[in-house]
Image (cartoon, coloured by chain):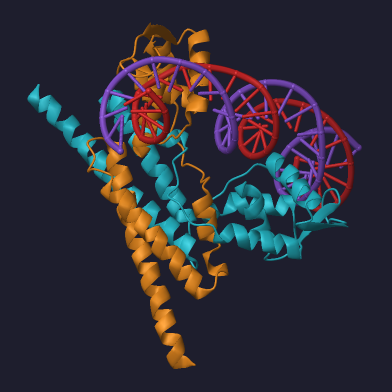
Chain colours: A orange, B cyan, C purple, D red
Amino acid sequence: MSLSHVLLGLLARGPASGWDLGSRLAKDPALGWNAELAQIYPALRRLLRGGFVALRRRRSPKGPPRREYRITAAGRREFREWLAEPLEIPKPHAAALARLAFLERKAPENRLASLTLYRTLLSEELSRTPSGTTAARRRRRILLESELHWADAEIAAALSGRTLSPEVR
Amino acid sequence: MSLSHVLLGLLARGPASGWDLGSRLAKDPALGWNAELAQIYPALRRLLRGGFVALRRRRSPKGPPRREYRITAAGRREFREWLAEPLEIPKPHAAALARLAFLERKAPENRLASLTLYRTLLSEELSRTPSGTTAARRRRRILLESELHWADAEIAAALSGRTLSPEVR
DNA sequence: CGGCGGTATATAAAAGTTCATATACTCTTG
DNA sequence: CAAGAGTATATGAACTTTTATATACCGCCG
């Protein structure tokens, strides 16, 4: 499972609580993995049982006591092994892409509306994405920029088709 | 669940067996969803129980009798409703991206090797991806091209760092 | 004619994910 | 001081996905 390994990778930077890890995953899409807290807590337990992390309880300035996890030597080893596995082109698994695949099934005006909304989301996401200091962040930014160009091109095409048709009629 | 809806979308183009649907999903990454047969068969059963598809058994020229599914009126309705839901920026969920996020954790020579392998995969995938006739296919191609550029830039950076260091030493 | 590869379906078990819900503490604001 | 927002942990139930395994038919090659 990748979630555990991503958690180990983050913990290798320093101790953190489940909450911290959840916020980091949510905040940084360049990490390539998203997970809910309800998934992270059991994952940390498994890592603890496996001896890949160690637990220390600490009082929190806010909220209930924090459970801070630190990576162990075994954890680092496990992470390094996972990291060494070869990269593969990801197979897509996203509702938005599936909907996009059936864009042409929509009436032209809905198609345009969907594209316009998606374009807005892309540009918001892009403005939330600072120019990267790591390869993964640079990758994320470049891809968002390209996708924005693509959306603009599709919108332009949809619009020209639309302004054309009244004349054709 | 999106898998069912993608299956409905494909069935809207004409009747198909589970096997057919599986091959199409595997062949066309622009569909935005990947699934194993072991997932598709139960999904088709659920759709059948829900009355979203109808089943007809037919002899196959090869292998056991085919179970061909056709979409029903209820299925089309369900698909259209799903399609109308707003698009969202996908949250990444891919082992390769997670590994990429920790690229800088690798020794420079491993980093270069990973990038080079990934670059090869990208270029193979790109050559397998024909210029698209649909928005989703065009998107897929554009993104692969951009990612290839990114990989080249990262490789160049890694190389220059590498050729520099012997001189620095 | 025996085995291999491709077509085709299927299921069980295990693992992972999502959704809803619950608890509890602290600080700020009205 | 009550209510709400943010921090923080946790779990059960339902559902989905992955992995492994099994079956069966056909044509082709050696």
* Looking at the image, residue A47 lies above or below residue B159: above
Looking at the picture, tell me which residue is in the foreground, A81 or A41: A41
To which quarter of the image does residue D20 belong? top right
* Residue B26 image offset from top left, x and y in percent: 60, 49
> How many numbered marks have been drawn onto this rendered protein structure?
0
Q: Residue at x 49, y 14 (%)?
A: A47
Residue at the left extreme, as displayed: B168
Answer with left or right where residue D12 lies relative to residue A57. Answer: right
Q: Is residue A69 visible?
A: yes
* Looking at the image, residue A124 lies above or below residue A48: below
Looking at the picture, tell me which residue is in the foreground, D1 or A46: D1
Q: Is residue A84 visible?
A: no
Answer with left or right where residue B165 lies relative to residue B55. Answer: left
* Looking at the image, residue A51 lies above or below residue B130: above
* Residue B23 image offset from top left, x and y in percent: 65, 51
* Residue A114 image offset from top left, x and y in percent: 46, 64
Q: Residue at x 53, y 59 (%)?
A: A101
Q: Residue at x 62, y 54 (%)?
A: B6
* Residue A17 image offset from top left, x and y in percent: 38, 18
Answer with left or right where residue A16 lies relative to residue C21. Answer: left
* Looking at the image, residue A34 lies above or below residue B83: above
